[in-house]
Image (cartoon, rainbow, N blue to C red):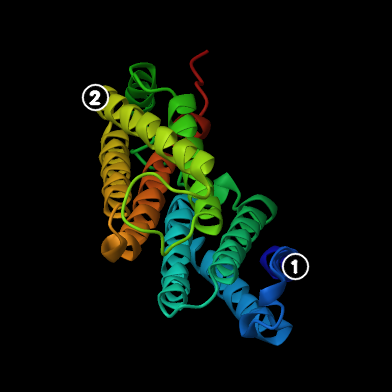
Amino acid sequence: MRVLWVSVLSMVVSLAGDAGLVKWATSAFPSTKDYAHYRFVDYGTLTIVGVAGACLAWFAITRVTSSPRWLFFRLAVTVMFGLWIPDLYLFVRGEPTSAVLSLMLMHLVIALVTYNALVHLAPVRQSELVNVGSPSWSAKAVTDRSEKVATHGVSRGAWTTMMMLVGAEMLIGFAELLSVPFDRPNGWVVSQGEAITLVHGALGGVLGCGALAIFALASREGRVERIAAIVGLIGVAIGGLGGLFCYAHSLRLIGMVLMFLGAATAFFGYLMPTIDDAPDPAQFLPPDLSR
């Protein structure tokens, strides 16, 4: 029942967010007022189907794994990136950039609303997830976990900072798409939107240095952290390569796609260490009756 009413709530909030984004987009860019995908029956139907599918997935996942939130988050991110692929296709077809970006933002808003509503308003009780008598929840496991946490060299704040920087880089990149002409001639210097281009490039340099530092520090950490550092570094490198491709007009579209994919990959990588919600074994150990 909790999943059912949270599903309805997610649909209502997501539809309201979609309508708000459409109103903002048509006000900021009047030329998109008659855009086909801005019709309520169009985005409303897809939103309801998508939210319903996510809620059914959460209901099923909570019954097949002891770490449902861990799995559901990764599934949600994968599906959201998959839904962005048709949006990129619309962009390649020559549809208005502002309209396509607003559709991508819709998908992001729906994912954020639905994920947070389900995991926070329809959570699984910890007692449903583990077997107290299982030998895996031993005192040694708790000690090993504590020692691992104590030896971490990269703080949670560092991962979060990198994630936020990547998100800022992506948002600035979207803003640059709207302010810098796509058909400009070859070259690094632009005649329109020069300030935002410089900010975008400078932040990319900061991200590159940060990705290298995280990669070096994470080599002494656990498997998840090492993988996250590698994925983040690869994503930043792909984004940087895309930035280089944007120099030439003939490669500019490929460069933009690479920058987007690189930022999305890096964001996902740096987010991984911050969402480890596996149950803490110390919470499920039997009481010490010797005391």
Mark before the other along the chain sequence, 2 or 1: 1
Percent of width and height locating residue 43: 65, 79
The reply to whether residue 267 is visible in this rendering is yes
Taking the spot 38% from the left edge, 33% from the top edge, the residue there is 207
- Work out whether residue 262 or residue 9 is closer to the camera in this orientation and state it: 262
Question: Would residue 200 be found to the left or right of residue 48 on screen?
Answer: left
Which kind of residue does numbered mark 2 sit on?
Ala
Q: From this view, report whether residue 112 is shown above or below residue 146.
A: below
Residue at the outermost top position: 291
Residue at position x 32%, y 54% in the image:
246
Residue to which mark 1 is pinned: 5
Judging from the image, what secondary structure is the residue with disc 2 in? helix
Q: Secondary structure at mark 1?
A: helix
Residue in the picture at 26% in, 35% down: 226
Residue occupying the point 51% across, 60% down? 62
Residue 216 disc label: 2
In which quadrant of the rendered view does residue 51 lie? bottom right
Q: Marks 2 and 1: which is nearer the front?
A: 2
Instruction: Give x and y (percent) for residue 47.
Output: 63, 75
Q: Is residue 26 left or right of residue 109?
A: right
Image location (x, y in percent) of residue 270: 40, 39
Residue 285 visible here = no
Q: Camera-side residue: 183 or 3?
A: 183
**Residue 140 versus residue 93 in the image, above or below:** above
Q: CA distance from mark 2 to mark 1?
A: 46 Å
Disc 1 residue crowd, few under 14, some 14–19, many 20+, Cα 10 Å: few
| Kind of residue sitting beneath label 1 | Trp
Where's residue 171, x and y in %? 53, 48
Residue 261 occupies which quadrant of the picture?
Answer: bottom left
Image quadrant for the N terminus? bottom right
